[in-house]
Amino acid sequence: MKHFIPSHLLLRLLCLIIAAGAGWIIVYGLQKLPEEDLGLTKKVIALVFIVGVCGFSAVYLLAWAFFYDRLETRQQRRQAETERAERRKPANEKLAEARKEQRSERNANYILGAVAIATSIYFLFDKEWLVAGLMAAVAAYLLYNAIRNIEPAQIKQKREEATRRQEVETLMETAKDDGAVIIVDHVDSLTAIEEAIEAFGEEYHGRKNGRNAIRLWQLERNKYALTFPLGYQPEAPMALMDELDIMELHPTAWFPSRRLKTLGEWTMLRVGQDSLVNAVTDTGLCYSDEGDFRLSPDPQLHLAFQPRPDITNNNPKKHEDFT
């Protein structure tokens, strides 16, 4: 099986043991069912516990043990779909969600403040001065927050991110990239590309000017292209190639030589067996990565340059923007 590793085997064995124990409880419990003089109610309770709880647990654990791979794959697929849908939400929709959350927070403060005031008045009539004073202080704090409309940190972060994405999307409407492209062929799962981009984005995404933003194109059924519509840092291309190679996607890339500080007009990049990026220019000069995302001439390396593909010939379909 795809994910059948020793740790999963141990978990499955544990589930089988627990399921067997639950089955033994059912058999033993039914044999020791209360006598007639204990009454119908106690019998029903015993049956519900023995057959219902233990039976359900046994069936669930057996299913989990035997179909772990399938259940895990399904859960990962659902999670990926949820994350994909969240990423694809337009910036204005996310901004509207942030504003709605802020209004809900403010209204909650108003309601709780009113409840605190009513509670304080109640204790005043009851001459519980200390409790009344505490509730009055709580009411003052809640109403102060509601009137000032202070943004919680989480909502503020969402608002700032939505605003930034809106600005980046506006820039992308008129942006024209420099022709750099990464081709990934024979892709079995789009999730692998998304995970590689996510790992790349932990360091390179999130800039207000959209630099290092990635646009994902679908060229064919299992063939994709990645471009940088708003430019990129010098080390970003090789950093992304490295992440794609970790996911075993075997990327091939073409970048303007001036951006990589190599000779010629175009430079083709591939990841070698040592997991370091190798390159060859259209002049035939080969380069290898020194280990810090910088290329240096390598006379020992021999790569054949292939012309940069024009992805517009494939009628590319824009799949998603990662900013």
Image (cartoon, grey):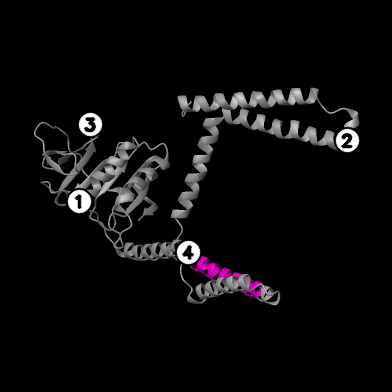
Residue 316: say if magenta: no
Q: Position of residue 26 (x, y in %)?
A: 74, 26
Q: Quadrant of residue 55?
A: top right
Which of the two discs, 3 and 2, sits closer to the camera? 2
At label 1, the amino acid type is Pro
How many C-alpha atoms fall within 10 Å of the one at disc 4: few (<14), some, or many (≥20)? few
Q: Which mark is residue 234?
A: 1
Mark nearer the N terminus (1 vs 2) = 2
Q: Are marks 1 and 3 in contact (CB under 8 Å)?
A: no
Q: Secondary structure at mark 4?
A: helix
Q: Quadrant of residue 33?
A: top right
Mark nearer the N terminus (4 vs 1) = 4
Furthest residue in direction left, as rendered: 299
Q: Secondary structure at mark 2?
A: helix
Q: Which mark is residue 40?
A: 2
Which of the two discs, 2 and 4, sits closer to the camera? 2
- On screen, residue 29 versus residue 1, left or right, reads right
Q: Which mark is residue 93?
A: 4
Furthest residue in direction right, as rendered: 37
Question: Alpha-carbon distance for marks 4 and 3?
Answer: 44 Å
Q: Quadrant of residue 205?
A: bottom left
Q: Which mark is residue 274?
A: 3
At label 2, the amino acid type is Leu
Which range of residues does the magenta coloring cover? 95-120
Question: Alpha-carbon distance for marks 2 and 4?
Answer: 58 Å
Question: Alpha-carbon distance for marks 4 and 1?
Answer: 33 Å
At label 3, the amino acid type is Asp
Q: Position of residue 31 (x, y in %)?
A: 80, 22
Tell me: residue 46, above or below residue 195.
above
Question: Alpha-carbon distance for marks 3 and 2?
Answer: 73 Å
